[in-house]
Image: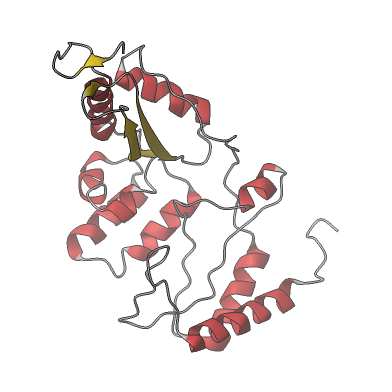
Amino acid sequence: NSGGHSSQPREDNAIYELGDALKKIQQFRFPVMWNDITLRSFAVDAETADDETAVALRRFVEKPGDKKALKTLEKQTGLNSVLRTTCVATMLKAGHAENALPQTATATVNCRIFPGVSVADVQAELARVVENDAIEFVTLDDPVESPASTLTPEIEAAVLNALKTRYPNIVAVPYMEAGGTDGLHFRRAGIPTFAIGSLFLREGDEPNYHGMNENLRVDAFNGGLDHWSLIIKELAGKPAASE
């Protein structure tokens, strides 16, 4: 906006315009999506979920996209994050002085994009939702797109065998995580890539991931090394299935 002295407010105000746009983004929901991994994880999650969630999970697995099931599942942030692409405002920067009208306002909107959806499509959809040509959408850095990997029998067997050796009563569940990974570069190159957790926590543990005082028990750390050793030894040196 053109700005000016705060003693003379104007109709055009960058902060208000951006606020209106962010409110529209907050209220918008991207279309629901699913893949083999998410459906498989939902089926297993249903075994330990509360009654209402369990019914919704099973209903969604039987009929992906079911609206009645969605009403229950999307209320839970953990489940909603893997049901669709999500975009949320995380940072704001606006104005240049306390007694001046803002000329610019900027927001960082962090998007977790469902595999198979392009960055350009998400950007275009946000612009459509906001409906304000004065607001410009710019991607930070150079985002890399990659497809989801299909879980291979060899990888799954190695994980299950390692788990059986250390914790035979624990069930392994493949799932899709709404997080970033360097593995996307390998997947983009056609190399199936998976993240395998090796840290086992006890009830009451509070590792506080990415927060202040991030921590982990020493025995959990050392046990994680043992877990990786079992998996790597089983997979290392094995010929590819096509050989």
Which residue is nearer to you in this view: 237 or 200? 200
Compared to 38, does 95 lie above or below?
A: above
Which residue is nearer to you in this view: 47 or 187? 187
Which residue is nearer to you in this view: 56 or 227? 227
Compared to 23, does 155 lie above or below?
A: below
> Image point 30% across, 27% down: which residue?
95
Visible residue check, residue 168: no
> What colouring style does the render use?
secondary structure
Is residue 29 toward the left or the right of residue 228 in the image? left
Hey, which quadrant is residue 65 in on the image? top left
Is residue 237 toward the left or the right of residue 26 in the image? right
Visible residue check, residue 7: yes
Compared to 23, does 57 lie above or below?
A: below
> Image point 67% across, 42% down: which residue?
188
> Image point 53% across, 36% down: which residue?
116
> Image point 73% across, 78% down: which residue?
233
Split into 4 quadrants, where in the image is the N terminus? top left
Q: Provide residue 70's location: percent of width, then percent of height.
A: 26, 44
Compared to 24, does 179 lie above or below?
A: below
Q: Provide residue 80's location: percent of width, then percent of height.
A: 32, 48
Hey, which quadrant is residue 226 in on the image? bottom right
Is residue 168 toward the left or the right of residue 146 in the image? left
Counting every numbered tag in the picture gives 0
Which residue is nearer to you in this view: 128 or 64? 128
Q: Provide residue 218's location: percent of width, then percent of height.
A: 50, 87
Residue lying at the far right of the rendered structure: 243
Q: Provide residue 180's location: percent of width, then percent of height.
A: 52, 51
Split into 4 quadrants, where in the image is the C terminus? bottom right
